[in-house]
Amino acid sequence: MIVILKHEARQEQIDRLREFFAKMGLGIHMSEGENATIMGLIGDTSRVDADLIATLDAVDAVRRIQEPYKQANRKFHPDDSVIDCGAGVKLGGGAFQLIAGPCSVESEEQIVAVAKAVKAAGASLLRGGAFKPRTSPYAFQGLHEEGLRLLKVARQETGMPIVTEIMDAAHLPLFEDVDVIQVGARNMQNFELLKELGHIRKPILLKRGLANTISELLMSAEYIMAGGNEDIILCERGIRTFETATRNTLDLAAVPVLHEKTHLPVVIDPSHATGVNRLVRPMALAAAACGADGLMIEVHNDPKHALCDGAQSLTPEEFAEVAKQVLAVRAVITA
Ligand code: PEP
Ligand code: MN
């Protein structure tokens, strides 16, 4: 981190700053130029509040030269992380996977039928919500423990690992037999939940918050990694902008940007990003083209009667078509 001092900074102010940083265990490198005096801070500056330092009288500007995330940072871990999702399914580092299934688990018949259909179409992981974060308290909230049980029945029937969302750390014992735990957009900055997930040894699919930056997403991944759990899959699912034609605005540039900044794999969810069934295919293809490590797509056997997110759900037939085209795009970009 670099602290640029004001021209008129007094020596006693500079000394106080030096003392302040020294007390934080940081080394200081002073460079006195003709136009500006610059303090270079040496050591782990992740605990330094740059915004606070910038408000001090003697300080003109503060620049971070090292990102505040370490474990998620590609600089310290140049190779792509490959996440083992169970049953031999690997995601990342060239291993591309389709995660598909309904928004919510509704019945055994529904989840098993969708699981079989998406597997036949090329999906390797089954998604399905049992605990649903709904905007309205009167909307279907998920089948909870029964939903988790039905997901396991579908896993038994198909061999596909299951991905499902956790909303409360107190529910962790219920998720012991889940293969990949999803943290939804609304909980991306539920730091107590993230800390708890750092203490388990299970892959986490971390979705980007509705109004969060890429750097905040990486800091949330860092929360989990700081606890010792390094198996994280990042998911871009659209962010909230002024645009209303789509449910959210899909930030596809997040894929190459994240690939530059982190070694963690990046998955795109075109379903929540657009909210519209017919927009899922073009965005899925675009996501594959820009290098996503996987896609998470909502599929329902009867979208018109889905208890949640029917408007954005594909039928199994539509999913099969999208999967075929996505794999064709993958073949082109990896050729
Ligand atoms: C979901 O995947 O079902 C979900 C609720 O997604 P998000 O957290 O991205 O809204
Ligand atoms: Mn949904």
Image (cartoon, rainbow, N blue to C red):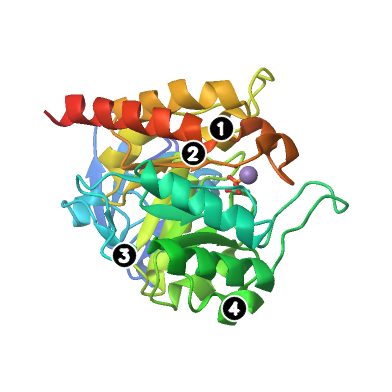
Q: Which residue is mark 2?
A: 269
**Secondary structure of residue under mark 4:** helix
Rendered-image quadrant of the C terminus: top left
Q: Spatial distance from mark 2 to mark 4, Cα to Cα?
A: 25 Å
- Mark 1–mark 2 contact, CB under 8 Å? yes
Q: Spatial distance from mark 2 to mark 3, Cα to Cα?
A: 42 Å
- Mark 2–mark 4 contact, CB under 8 Å? no
Q: Spatial distance from mark 1 to mark 2, Cα to Cα?
A: 6 Å
Name the quadrant where ligand 2 sits. Answer: top right
Three-letter amino acid code of the residue under disc 4: Leu
Count of numbered labels shown in the rendering: 4
Query: Quick one: 224 or 238, which is closer to the camera?
Result: 238
Q: Which residue is mark 3?
A: 26
- Picture residue at 16% right of the left edge, 51% below the top: 78
Q: Position of residue 58 (x, y in %)?
A: 48, 44
**Secondary structure of residue under mark 1:** helix
Categorize mark 4 by other alpha carbons within 10 Å: few (<14), some (14-19), many (20+). Answer: few
Mark before the other along the chain sequence, 1 or 4: 4
Mark before the other along the chain sequence, 3 or 1: 3
Residue 268, quarter of the rendered image: top left
Q: Which residue is mark 1?
A: 273
Whether 100 is drawn above or below 178: the answer is: above
Whether 258 is drawn above or below 247: the answer is: below
Q: Position of residue 102 (x, y in %)?
A: 58, 47
